[in-house]
Image: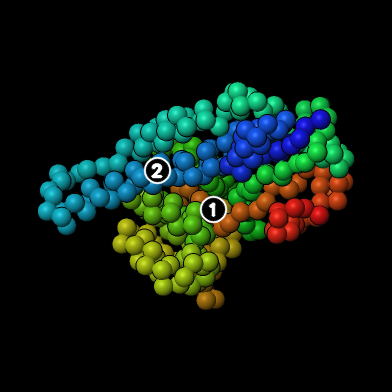
Amino acid sequence: RYNLVVIGAGTAGLVAAAGAAGLGAKVALIERDLMGGDCLNVGCVPSKGVISAARVAAAVRNAGEFGIRVPDGVRVDFPAVMHRMRRLRAGISRHDSAARFRELGVDVFLGPGRFTASDTVEVDGKSLRFKRAVIATGARAAELPIPGFHEVGVLTNESVFSLTKLPRRLAVVGGGPIGSELAQTFARFGSQVTHIEKLDHILSREDSDAARIVQAALVRDGVDLRLNTSTVGMEADGDEKIVRLESNGTTDAVHVDQILVGIGRQPNVEGLGLEAVGVEYDSRAGVHVNDRLQTT
């Protein structure tokens, strides 16, 4: 019997497991995919790796404003950028590895975890009993409920960092943090970027004046910003992808090489057996908790 079972080895789960083990608790950590979760593998680490490279590219391109003469024809070596990002990610990964957490005294189980009773979770054919459990399963990229979304082969934050070739033309759907930072990054690398947002400015959860400053910076970097525009369909035409748009009653189409969708996140709550143990949740907001992060 464990003092604590943690489901999910992303940022939250790793901190919970390491902290509890450090205090002397008997801890089990369950991960169905990659240790480190989104942050290490498809989120904070790789995104900041490529963003830092894009910032350098922009600084070189604008060096003349500071009296620094840079030879014409300076270009971005995109495969080298992505190789550097993966090298950085690999260097950090050992800190989140199963081996390191086993050294900390945590029992690591790789596979999907599912509650089977109020004090039992099953993983890889084993039943683990616990006194307390932490649900730290995180979220994934939200999907667009439009025709062609699943057929056309879109990129999300979970796949964009696997690119080895810079898309000549890129459509970015969604003006939140993920879509905005990657729209700017790929524009700075040299892609022809069309950024699509259904509201009247990007970063809708932020202060509107601050968001418009960021918006102006994207436009300066060459991003073609389409505001008040809805994405209503996608289709493939040979090697091309077509994004169907609607704005103020008029329709348009953008022809690109890749489509990146960053319209938000949806929680990973399916398949955990939450119904069986009386944990309330919904597919949009995730697990219901009180002010102490306790479930029902």
First reached walking from the N terminus: tag 1 or tag 2: 2
- Above or below 35: residue 202: below
Badge count: 2
Front residue of this view, candidates 296 and 79 = 296
Front residue of this view, candidates 205 and 23 = 23
Judge the density around disc 1: few (<14), some (14-19), many (≥20) Cα neighbours within 10 Å. Answer: many
Where residue 1 appears, x then y in whole percent? 81, 30
Tell me the SS state at disc 2: helix
Where residue 145 appears, x then y in whole percent? 66, 58
Q: Residue furthest front?
A: 23
- Position of 153 compared to 208: left or right? right
Residue at x 47% of width, y 32% of height:
92
- Residue that carries the numbered disc 1 in the rendered image: 261
* Quarter of image, res 209: bottom left
- Position of 137 compared to 49: left or right? right
Where residue 102 appears, x then y in whole percent? 63, 24
- Residue that carries the numbered disc 2 in the rendered image: 50
Q: Mark 2 belongs to which amino acid? A: Val
Question: Cα distance, mark 1 to mark 2?
Answer: 17 Å
Where residue 179 appears, x then y in whole percent? 48, 55
